[in-house]
Image (cartoon, rainbow, N blue to C red):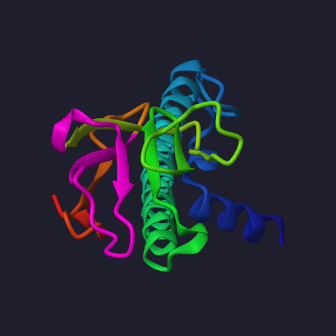
């Protein structure tokens, strides 16, 4: 029986039959551990970059939808003649401010401030007349401040969406 077990050991584990070398085969070498950790670190770094880019894109998309909704709300208030007033949207770096009247007044308590995510900003504002305010005309909803602006990532400025405001007052995302 002992001979039989010895034969199995030698056929299944050839090193057992030959004997052990002077080098210990019980563990991993430092080089093997370093290589394994290096591979793990690279994989984690690549995954983190992909996740970070996804989060930035999601923040930009969400901010774009919010900006479109605020512009649409201001235009709808004018068209529906709510309060028989004009409304506009002031574009600032980290916020959109919906304001009553034809001119933005920063101290007006009726202003509605909409803060954007800290990950994004409003940039490259190119409105007619060099304005940062989009004011909608009563009953028609048209604007003389048509043009474009960007909602973009603060960390990665290559991630952005362009919002176009037409003369009609309608706002939409311009495809890049």
- Residue at image location 42% in from the left, 48% down from the top: 102
* Residue 100 percent coordinates (x, y): 55, 52
Residue 36 as seen in the image, left or right of residue 133: right
- Residue at image location 72% in from the left, 61% down from the top: 6
Q: Quadrant of residue 150?
A: top left
Q: Residue most toward the bottom?
A: 80
- Residue at image location 19% in from the left, 63% down from the top: 167
Count of numbered badges drawn on the protein: 0
Q: Residue most toward the right?
A: 1
* Residue 166 percent coordinates (x, y): 20, 64
> Is 138 in front, or is 133?
138
Query: Against 140, is 12 above or below?
Result: above
* Residue 140 percent coordinates (x, y): 31, 75
Query: Against 112, is 11 above or below?
Result: below
Residue 98 as seen in the image, left or right of residue 107: left
Q: Residue most toward the front?
A: 84
Residue stretch rendered in magenta on the structure: 128-152
- Residue at image location 58% in from the left, 31% down from the top: 106
Indicate whether residue 142 is drawn in magenta. yes
Q: Quadrant of the N terminus?
A: bottom right
Indicate whether residue 124 is drawn in magenta. no
Residue 133 as seen in the image, left or right of residue 107: left
């Amino acid at each position: 029986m002992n001979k039989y077990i010895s034969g199995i050991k030698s056929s299944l584990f050839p090193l057992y039959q030959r004997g052990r070398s002077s080098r210990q085969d019980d563990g991993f070498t430092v080089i093997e551990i370093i290589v394994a950790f290096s591979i793990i670190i690279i994989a984690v770094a690549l995954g983190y970059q992909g996740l970070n880019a996804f989060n930035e894109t999601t923040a930009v998309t969400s901010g774009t939808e919010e900006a479109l909704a605020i512009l649409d709300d201001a235009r709808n208030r004018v068209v529906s003649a709510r309060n028989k007033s004009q409304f506009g949207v002031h574009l600032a770096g980290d916020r959109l401010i919906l304001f009553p009247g034809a001119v933005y007044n920063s101290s007006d308590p009726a202003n509605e401030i909409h803060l954007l995510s800290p990950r994004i900003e409003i940039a490259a504002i190119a409105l007619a007349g060099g304005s940062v305010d989009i004011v909608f005309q009563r009953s028609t909803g048209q604007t003389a401040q048509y043009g474009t602006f960007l909602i973009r990532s603060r960390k990665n400025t290559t991630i952005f969406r362009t919002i176009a405001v037409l003369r009609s007052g309608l706002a939409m995302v311009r495809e890049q």
